[in-house]
Amino acid sequence: MFGETTYLDNGAATRLDERVLEAMRPYYFDTYAVATSEFGYSIGITAREALDEARAALAAQLGGRPNEFIFTSGSTESSNMAIKGVMMALAEKKGRHLITSKIEDFPVLNSARALERQGYRVTYLAPDGDGRIDPEAVRAALEPDTALVSIQHANQEIGTVQDIAAIGAVCREAGVVFHSDATHTFTRVPLDVGRVPVDLVTVSAHTIHGPRGVGGLYVRKGTPLRKWMDGGFQEFDLRAGVEDIAGAAGFAAAAALITQEETDHIQAMRDRVIERALAEIPFTMLNGHRTERTPQNANITFHYVEGESITLQLDMRGFAVSTGSACFSKSLEASHVIMGIGGDHERAHGSVRFTFGRYNVMEDADRIIDNIAEVVAQLRAISPLYPGKEQA
Amino acid sequence: MTPFPYNEIVLEHFRNPRNVGKMENPDGKATEGSPACGDMVAVYLKVNEENKVIEDIKFESYGCASNIATGSIITELAKGKTLEEAKKITWKEASEALGGLPALKAHCSVLAVEGLRSAVRDYEERHGLVTERVPTTLETLHKRLKHVMNPLCGLDVVRTDLVKSLTLEDGAVKVEIALPADHQFAAVVKEDIKDKIEPLWDIKDVVVEFVGE
């Protein structure tokens, strides 16, 4: 039904790769048992081996050890687990202060807000105009009772990549645990926990053509973490629940399919959109850092028009993109990211995010710009805010 | 059938809005909404001075599909009507003429109706049709505040209980809003309130205070 859609919202979710589905299939119809201990029965032991294999492969992607990777139901759970788990584990021993940023994705931001309601203190650091957090600002915000710093690896909306090596170094020096949400960088932007002093990393399969509802949390050995999903003793007794072995196998398969060549191609499409939009369409601006950004993300504000009208017009022309406009969101709130980097409502309402994936071709980048140029011109022609009409 | 929450009539008006654009030397005009609340409508009128019939009407929109479609339908409904008739056009009529609008988008479309009414009022004020200077009452203020959007949910600040208190003394108005002063929308709400209340002829001062936590 949507075969003709040009899908440019890969930052929200990606199309599953058939090869991933094939990797998952055996664990639904053949090796479908739970993962038993090595003293269990054969079908369960084989399932256990598949789970261990997937775990080892994903841990290795981050430079970690197999017993440092916990499977979860996705990045929302991973970030909840990291933030609430560390803060609760250290509440008595270290303190109740958390440092994060204003532009984190909702799992981090709303975990922080939930903790605030329970009497924890949170510092929300403001990024600069490109969305970058200054490592020195993290240092300045540290207090004797700071238990955790959580700064994303890259932003969900504007793609800005943080210098988490420098932020991690500040935390390490101060003896503070450091968590980073790498949902939008995993396998696309290098992250090696052997070099970057980060203690917990949120990752997810849904952004890399893997299954929805499967994620992971890297937990450096020795990191204090309170278990908060009670039940059985799965996942090193840190996350209860029957393991999703098909999901784990699919996640590992998806990660293994990412190549540098593909990432370079995705980045080239991103650059084409940014370059053409800024050069060919007046009153546009790039949101996020020009170079320190994820390869898949272009985010551009088209001034004097409202994003929902753009996305609806584009949808009718067969394109799927997203916007930071309040009208588009379920909450009817303008993007906290655009507002967080110093933008105003008008800039947020007119922002459009294009995120590329495996199934896009360079022609998509050209076609979306050709189409959005027309749509924006039409909407500006009826906009009371547009100053360019006199000239036109 | 479309997978959108909008029906075909709405989409048709969205794609091909009628009577769109700026009008040179309008007899009456008004702007409702603001970029901050995400929707804005400007309405321009040409009125026959003899019989008070709206001979031409134009609108501009910065907003989502409902906003544009309602702006379009409202111009069709108002054209050829007298000012008195035009003032009585309701959001419900506009919505019905469009075959229905999603409830979530009600506020975007209400703006267009308000834009038309304000443009009519503007015409009446400019042409001396409002001669009686009625003293402002709390009720008048309340009515005006119903045109101030709560950007958090897109409904007005009265309906969403953001107005904690409202006082009027010797032409001085004080409004207390249940938002923290450092809230991202505080400045916008304050500006909108001042815009709506200050033009009243006997109001000398408008103070907006934020009392939320």
Image: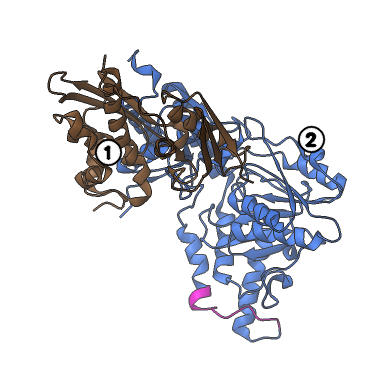
The colour assigned to chain B within the rendered structure: brown
Q: Which chain is blue?
A: A
Write down the residue under mark 1: B69
Kindly identify which chain the residue marked by label 1 belongs to: B
Mark 1 and mark 2 in contact? Answer it, CB < 8 Å.
no
Residue at 81% x, 39% y: name it. Answer: A139
* Location of residue A335 in the rendering, given as x and y in whole percent from the top left corner: 53, 41
Residue at 23% x, 42% y: name it. Answer: B94
Q: CA distance from mark 1 to mark 2?
A: 50 Å
Q: Amino acid at mark 2?
A: Glu
Task: Specify start and end residues of the magenta stretch as a single range.
Answer: A27-38
Q: Quick check: can you spot residue B46?
A: yes
* Location of residue A91 in the rendering, given as x and y in whole percent from the top left corner: 81, 59
Residue A136: numbered disc:
2
Q: Amino acid at mark 1?
A: Ala
Foreground residue among A80 and B146:
B146
Say above or below: B42 vs A327.
above
Say above or below: B53 vs A295.
above
Is residue A349 rendered to the left or right of residue A256? left
